[in-house]
Image (spheres, rainbow, N blue to C red):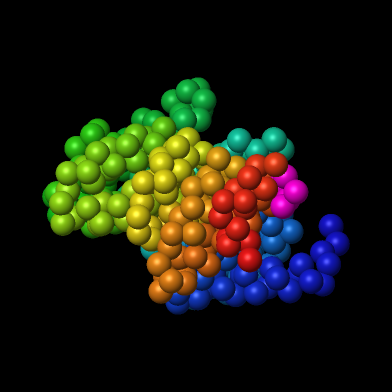
Amino acid sequence: MVIKASSAAEIRQLVDALASPGEVGSEAAAARLRIIGPRAIDRLLGAYGKATTPAARATILRVLEPIADGRCVAPASQALTDPATEVSAAGAALLRGLVDAADPRVANEALEALVAAALDATATPETRRTASDALRGVPAAIRAGVADAVAPAVTSPSPDPPESTASVWAAALDGRLPGRPAALREALLVHAPAASLASLQRLVDAVRVRESTAGPQAAEWLAVRGAAHQALASRGSRVALYDLRETLERSSAPLPVSFLSALHTIGDRSCLEPMAEAYAHAPAQEAWWRQQLASAFQAIMAREKLTVRSAAVKKILAKWPGILV
């Protein structure tokens, strides 16, 4: 595929922005790159090889996940043994997505990488657990072949304190949220990439309920819910899109940037009206919020193949014209 010079320049700038110290800039760039898709693969893989921080490597892997290109097998396999848990978890999630690839060769390579890591007696327990978790949901016959060998690594006593990310995560998936929202957010960052989409959806619902009665901690729980939405969006899932839309409709103040990133990535036309209304009612001093709403609005229009002449967009702009200015 030949990439036009203008597109190549945009991709280069977006990839460079992934390492931006500003959370908004990095996440906005990641969302845009997911939309660009396969055309950005070469630049993303090159950036991954040069990335010097775990955060940058994990971000690039999460951007690559929904693109699902066979060239990602090698770096994702390498990431499984990365000492940074956020990187190994992102690598496992990327491989899990490739297991479902249409190309049998790619699917087999991804599966073999996960199985090999899960069975590797020389690997760290955390690496084996991460690979094993990613194998959940594969056909039973395949899973049965590694379950017994993986069990010792998964069930062996952990040197972590009682409230380790693994124990917090397991309890949360069972409906028992921790007292500290920060504990769940840390566990979510580590374990969400390999979690099932259904379990993440249930977690969104559980956190929303906790948030409604959390008093002074409500904002912290809102940030946790946003992180869960971002984890779903990074995998291209819309199973909790209803909550994203309803949160935007109910909110009278700017939301955490994770909500914006999720809207930018998986929002659909049903989100456009509440986004335009939020833009119109945003305080003048919240320029970043208005800018990101406008950017997400335009990204959804492009994804849904809508123009200013589309009936749905014309109706919205008649009430709230500012979002496309």
Range shown magenta: 306-310
Q: What residue is shown at x 41% (from left), y 32% (from top)?
A: 198
User: Is residue 195 among the parts visible in the rendering?
Assistant: no
Q: Is residue 193 magenta?
A: no
Residue sitting farthest toward the top = 141
Specify the quadrant of the image occupied by residue 53: bottom left
- Is the C terminus in the top left, top right, bottom left or bottom right quadrant? bottom right
Where does the image place residue 227, in percent across and percent down from the top left? 38, 53
Where does the image place residue 55, in percent across and percent down from the top left? 44, 67
Residue sitting farthest toward the right = 2
Q: What residue is shown at x 44% (from left), y 59% (from top)?
A: 281
Where does the image place residue 207, in percent across and percent down from the top left? 27, 43
- Is the N terminus in the top left, top right, bottom left or bottom right quadrant? bottom right
Q: Considering depth in this image, is 126 or 284 the residue closer to the camera?
A: 284
Image height of 36 relative to 99, above or below: below
Image height of 206 relative to 272, above or below: above
User: Is residue 204 among the parts visible in the rendering?
Assistant: yes
Is 128 positioned to the left or the right of 4 in the image?
A: left
Q: What residue is shown at x 55% (from left), y 40% (from top)?
A: 270
Where does the image place residue 23, in percent across and percent down from the top left? 44, 69
What is the magenta segment's predominant secondary structure? loop
Q: What residue is shown at x 51% (from left), y 39% (from top)?
A: 238
Is 291 positioned to the left or the right of 14 in the image?
A: left
Is 120 positioned to the left or the right of 188 in the image?
A: right
